[in-house]
Amino acid sequence: MIDPSERVLTGVVGPPEAMTPARLPVPAGLGRLLVLAVVFVCAACGLVYELELVALATYLDGDSVTQASVVLSVMVFAMGVGALLAKRMRCRAAVGFGLVETGLALVGGCSAMALYACFAWLGRSHSALVGFSLILGVLIGAEVPLLMTLIQRVRRQDAGGAVADLFAADYVGALVGGLAFPFLLLPSLGQLTGALVTGAVNAVAGGALVLWLFRRDLTVRARWTLLGVNALVLVLLAAGMVLAAPFERAARRAVYGASARVAVQTGIQEVVLTGGTEAGAGAGHGRKGSGRPLELFLDGRLRVSSDTEFRYHEALVHPAMAGGPRGRVLVLGGGDGLAVREILRYRSVRSVTVVELDPGVTELAHSDPGLARLNHRSLADPRVQVVTADAFDWLRQQEGSGRAGRPAPYDVIVSDLPDPGITASTKLYSQEFYGLAARMLADDGRLVVHAGPPVTRPRAYWTVEATIRSVGLATVPYRLPGRPVDFFGGPDRPVDSARPAPADASAASPLQYWGFVLAARHRPRFGLAPDAPVLTGLTLQELQEGQRGEARCRMSGLPPSTLMHPRYPD
């Protein structure tokens, strides 16, 4: 693939020995068409490699903006280096192009597997990401002068015409590759096999062009060398496809431990469940039983642990259920059914609407025995309606429905969404999002938001609070100690397989705090309702201490986060 930032037209006409007409087995017009077809295929493969690196790096390291910036900037720089290095190969452009495509197929095809291996067994993949970006960029950049030389040798034409033809084939190929990755390769083959198949296509296209169309330019030795190298690369890629499934299982065990029992790629994210298979594990409202605790991971981030989730969900839900009516409740996120479990403990609740983006999560909440036991099968309650939608888009649609179609306002809105430091979630912590939510609130309604860890990331937490205040709501920030900091990096943070939890983590490590913000049109009464159910992991005294603790740590003067100016760095 050719990048606009390195379209240097100097040197497109090679030295005299590189400009001798090629001896082709087909007419020149057909040969030129075949070269452009290979340009198309190679451009598609190059963009797939690029998107594969961005997608996998985002999943493994988080913060899609940072990861995309690293991959793209490093690759564009390396493409310029590759173009300069390839100038020395133009005198033997056919052999050079064959070797470049073979290397590109092998490196690009195996890149996803190598990155995942680094993450699973070494605990870090960032250095490997930069390395693969450099190598792929150099190889992709080397295609430019070699293809220009080959297309000129097929049929001489002015440099402008040759560049236009090459760019057209390249851009169309990039379009096809860019669309094929999210809509075909990723859902049907997955990241590992998709990259390997792309590498095989790349090797076949490059090898066929050189070994057939330009075979008369090759010495016997060069021909057999290229043939052997291409065959070896194809064998390695085929072996990778065969071993992809067991490799992924082994890597998953390295990341999540031997108790990983459910792994689903939903099309939105990877969902993994570990533990929770024993009758006692996760039973009794989240208390640890005889088996391993149930843990739910979304894209490698621990979202639920049955050892501690009841404290989180009780702290999230019950202060919002106090201080006013609670007949109509809206839950944004919460597809695991655990927040709904707490809401349904109030008899006065008439209806609960759950807006969850990923239907795979709600399906597991229904069907997985461990998770269904943990959430008390709350999503099957007749008072609960589950809507599959993006929370921001759903709120916007309700706002635009008109008076006749707009639902009645909600007494309580519970925002149980991923950490604001995750780039994909930034819009769900924006001024625009809270403005939409505020308009869905009844006059005496309450909004409660999971706002991230207030101790380890205080600026992000207080930015959430400032953003909620910016839409005219009064706020009460509070926190609750959750799990030890060293336990998988805390809630919503990537799993660190190189740093397992200590045997007695609660005694050995400082606590990770969960942060919440309760909001209403007027300052809400903070506490528990007189008719609140018996809570197993939370006391009124803890809530009050958490509210006083955050009041002492307030950060003032922070601007709100908006869609056009997000303020949640990872």
Image (cartoon, rainbow, N blue to C red):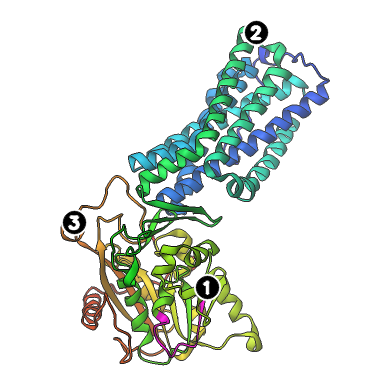
* Residue that sits furthest to the front in the current view: 279
Which numbered disc, 3 or 2, marks the residue closer to the eye?
Answer: 3
| Residue that appears at 45% across and 71% down | 337
In the rendered image, the vertical position of residue 408 relative to residue 570, given as above or below: below
Please report whichever mark, 3 or 2, sits nearer to the chain's N-terminal start: 2
Cα distance in 3D space between marks 3 and 2: 68 Å
Q: Secondary structure at mark 2?
A: loop
Q: Circle 2 is placed at which residue position?
A: 219
Q: Which of the two marks, 1 or 3, is nearer to us in this view? A: 3
Q: Between residue 186 and residue 57, name the one nearer to us.
A: 186
**Viewer-proximal residue among 385 and 86:** 385
**Among the 4 quarters of the image, the one containing residue 416:** bottom left
- Amino acid identity at mark 1: Val
Question: What residue does disc 3 label?
Answer: 504
Percent from the top left, x then y, of residue 231?
A: 59, 21
Label 3: which secondary element: loop
Q: Is residue 348 magenta?
A: yes
Q: Amino acid at mark 3?
A: Asp
Q: Which residues are magenta?
A: 343-355
**Residue 474 shows up from this direction:** no
**Type of amino acid at the residue the image marks with label 2:** Thr
N-term mark: 1 or 2: 2
Residue displayed at 73% across by 23% down: 152
Residues at marks 1 and 3, CA–CA distance in whole angstroms: 37 Å
* Residue farthest along the top direction in this orientation: 220
